[in-house]
Image (tube, grey):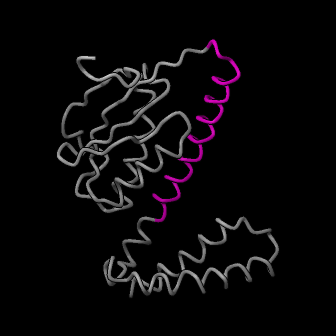
Amino acid sequence: MKRWPTIGLSLAVLWLFVRGVALEPRVIVGEFIIGLFVGVPLAFFTRRFYTETVPVIAVFRAVPYIAAYLVLFGTELIKANINVAYRVLAPSMPIEPRVIELPLRVESDLAITTIANSITLTPGTLSMDYDDERNSLYVHAIAGANREAIVAPIRAWEDYALRIFDEERGPSSKVPHPPKDHAFDGGKRDGE
């Protein structure tokens, strides 16, 4: 199956979420048609940037993992929002920022980007950089003293991403190299 029509259709569905349409059939259909008029030509003109066909069976195989990823991400998003709101409302709570190196098992650009964006969308954490040689993300966390509390949900996302993006490694694969932790130094450089 050709990929650009599928991407065009996906962009039309995404348009519905971006627009935040009311749950009225007439409004949904109207906005979906607008999304098609925007998404399909965009997908057609950018088709040279992605593979020509869609592995339909692989997509259907990934659907349960995508659903599980979204549920897990939503849960972590809610917990992180509550945690950050509590830190704002109770200034006595400690904020111990850290930059954590997170070695990844996923290797495809799309899987790495998905995880990095999930981290950045979660309040209290931010994907700062990616080291291609070490296949590591550098994550800033406002409460980074407990490294495991930061890394555990990201590893769970990565377990699903390994299956969603049909990576070589599996969820039981070991992390390729040991991570390094970096204390936040307020922007000072060595020797200052």
Question: Which residue is at the front of the view, 157 or 62?
Answer: 157
Residue drawn at x 48%, y 36% as measured from the top left: 125
The region drawn magenta spans 63-92
What residue is drawn where x is 39% and y is 87%? Answer: 2
Question: Could you tell me residue 148's position as x and y percent?
Answer: 40, 26
In this rendering, the answer to whether 178 lies above or below 23 is above
* Quadrant occupied by the N terminus: bottom left
Whole-percent x and y of residue 190?
24, 20
**Residue 123 placement, left or right of 111:** right
How many numbered circles does the render carry?
0
Most frequent secondary structure within the magenta stretch: helix
Q: Position of residue 77 (x, y in %)?
A: 58, 42
Residue 163 against residue 138 in the figure, above or below = below
* Residue 161 image point, x, y percent: 38, 54
Nearer-the-camera pick, 108 or 37: 37
Above or below, 64 against 44 in this view is above
- State left or right for residue 126 relative to residue 79: left
| The quadrant where residue 61 appears | bottom left
Q: Is 18 on the left or on the right of 137, as rendered?
A: right
In the image, is residue 70 part of the stretch drawn in magenta? yes
Q: Is residue 106 left or right of residue 126?
A: left
Most extreme residue toward the front, as rendered? 192
Classify 171 as above or below 142: below
Tell me the quarter of the image containing the C terminus: top left
Name which residue lies at 51% across and 53% down.
68
The image quadrant that residue 175 belongs to is top left
**Residue 118 in magenta stretch:** no
Residue at image point 33% right, 54% down: 162
Q: Nearer the viewer, residue 182 or 153?
A: 182
